[in-house]
Amino acid sequence: MEELTMSIPQSMFLVIFGASGDLCKRKLMPALYLLYREKRVPATFAILGVARTSYSDASFRENIRTELIRYLSEDQMDEGIMREFLGCLYYQPMNPAREEDYTTLKKRLDEMDKDLNNRSNYLFYLAVPPALYEIIPQFLKKARLTGSPGMKRVVVEKPFGYDLQSAGNLNKIYTSVFQEDRIFRIDHFLGKETVLNILAFRFANSIFEPLWNRNYIDYVEITAVEKLGVERRAGFFEQTGTLRDMVQNHLMQLLALIAMEPPRQFEATSFRDEVSKVYRSLRPLTEETAKSMVIRGQYTGADDIKGYREEESVAPDSRTETFVAMKVFVDNWRWSGIPFFLRTGKRMPTKVTEIIIHFKQTPYHLFECTGTHCPVTDSLVIRIQPEEGIALRFALKVPGSGFEVNMTDMDFSYASLGQLPVMDAYSRLIEDCFAGDSTLFSRGDTVEDSWTFFMPVLDYWQRHPEAPLYSYPAGTWGPPEADRLVHEAGFEWSNPCKNLTKTDKYCEL
Ligand SMILES: NC(=O)c1ccc[n+]([C@@H]2O[C@H](COP(=O)([O-])OP(=O)(O)OC[C@H]3O[C@@H](n4cnc5c(N)ncnc54)[C@H](OP(=O)(O)O)[C@@H]3O)[C@@H](O)[C@H]2O)c1
């Protein structure tokens, strides 16, 4: 059995299923090129793309070259390195849904092992539609591509399951083929520098953590919205919806990073144990709270923008939600009684992902307050994208006579660090897969914990198709019912602007 070591192995082949697809061209290949350029791949390295589309090695290389030119910036391109990188690419046409094709795959990998001196170390990357997630590991196993000798690992793209039952079923299949710590359930969100920076911000500083609890914090907002509609993903999105596509994974990960206890060490077991504790502390939803604490919406047309139901591949009476706002409680010692408001949607006024920690007011107001933020409440804005950074909003005296106070921002822009990383989340996470470090990947039990939390909502929506689905015009901040959710708790959404330091309800977009 492979002994897991946290360093990049001497030799390894990456086998990408779905190599003709969008994810491979747009994200994986640029990420791999950058890793290659930085010499952060195994010394003996090859990428074998597999899919049904008919390419030869040469035409696959040519196709990827065209895509790299499209997706890399000019300063990332280097002709010499590009040539070397393309030389590592191979292609095997096959249908991943057909068992007999895996015999051909095994034969090809055996030949490549011999030619390139690889010791049967394979990292399988499933960049295919989720309907194929079940079958591929089973066919790999039957073809004797997953056992000894050599290291065998697998990366599975999101979404991992459609509900608790399907996620549980996938977990059973994957753990019957690979050991849990060789299964990399990827969600590129967790590889983003700014998401990782939440951990550094919280646990590398001594000044914030003492305030990071129910005694000082009033409520937390987590917003991840986009300006675009469903675009080319309508067919997929119709079957998925925003709760499954965004809330169950991305927003829950952000919630976990904000609410978790410090892990004993920054390594896979300690970190993922703490994430799991947060999910297990969530106040369970019931049919009643699914009605009152979860608001779903769907955009309608506005100006020259089509409504969701007018989009291609969308049913004219579709009940798929494109917006979700919800109130969540983490029932533990640190967070008891503090609401976390989550909000995500398509066709919003802007594209932004940010977390706002709202601190409690002072017990008594000594000073007169001016401006729009009265009474004064301090807040901390953690901006994930765009204009990544952190802003601390607090009150200062207005210059001049008297003693009026108004809010000011102390802000840090991530770009000001100068040396921004050249690699994106995919590079970071693929490198972690080479190194066998699963810290930033979801563990099987945690995925199921998250689905468990959302099942009452999904069941309620399924059993009650008449349950409210509020409409909102494209380009607005969602249905008014989402405002009611925060207003009845005595709070407000802070509709963010593009500009980090203008997180103001009335800001210009
Ligand atoms: N695209 C993204 O930005 C993105 C982001 C996050 C996660 N993901 C996830 O990553 C996975 C891949 O995404 P993608 O956008 O690259 O998907 P895609 O373009 O729809 O599909 C990838 C490839 O899978 C093969 N394929 C499609 N249907 C098949 C079928 N019925 N049987 C066998 N092969 C089939 C196709 O290749 P052939 O026709 O050549 O066989 C296709 O090129 C999905 O699970 C998606 O949810 C994608």
Image: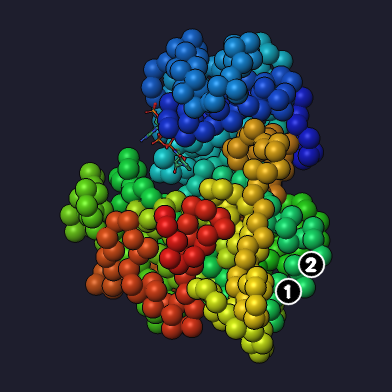
Q: Residues within 10 Å of mark 2 (few under 14, many from 20)?
A: few
Q: Is residue 310 above or below residue 451?
A: above
**How crowded is the residue under tag 1: few (<14 C-alpha within 10 Å), some, or many (20+)?**
few
Give the Cα separation between the discs numbered 1 and 2.
Answer: 8 Å
Please name the residue that numbered disc 1 is placed on.
Answer: 211
In this view, which residue lies farthest toward the front? 401
Q: Position of residue 276 (x, y in %)?
A: 65, 64
- In depth, the one of 30 and 456 nearer the eye is 30
Q: Quick check: 434 left or right of 481?
A: right
| Residue 317 placement: quadrant | bottom left
| Mark 2 secondary-structure assignment | loop
Task: Find out whether the residues at labels 1 and 2 contact each other: C-beta distance under 8 Å.
Answer: yes
Query: Percent position (x, y) of residue 78?
Result: 61, 16
In depth, the one of 135 and 305 nearer the eye is 305
Residue shown at 54% from the left, 31% from the top: 28
The reply to whether residue 152 is visible in this rendering is no
Give, as a three-letter code, the residue at label 2. Ile
- Which quarter is ligand 1 in? top left
In the image, residue 497 lies at what x, y percent? Answer: 47, 57
Tag 1 secondary structure: helix
Which quadrant holds residue 443? bottom right
Residue depicted at x 60% and y 23%: 76
Q: Is 59 on the left or on the right of 362, as rendered?
A: left
Which quadrant does the N terminus fall into?
A: top right
Residue 323 appears at what percent x and percent y?
A: 37, 61
For the point 66% across and 28% down, which residue is it?
Answer: 35
Disc marking residue 207: 2
Distance from mark 2 CB to nearest ligand 1 atom below 8 Å:
no
The quarter of the picture where residue 178 lies is: top right
Callout 1 amino acid: Leu
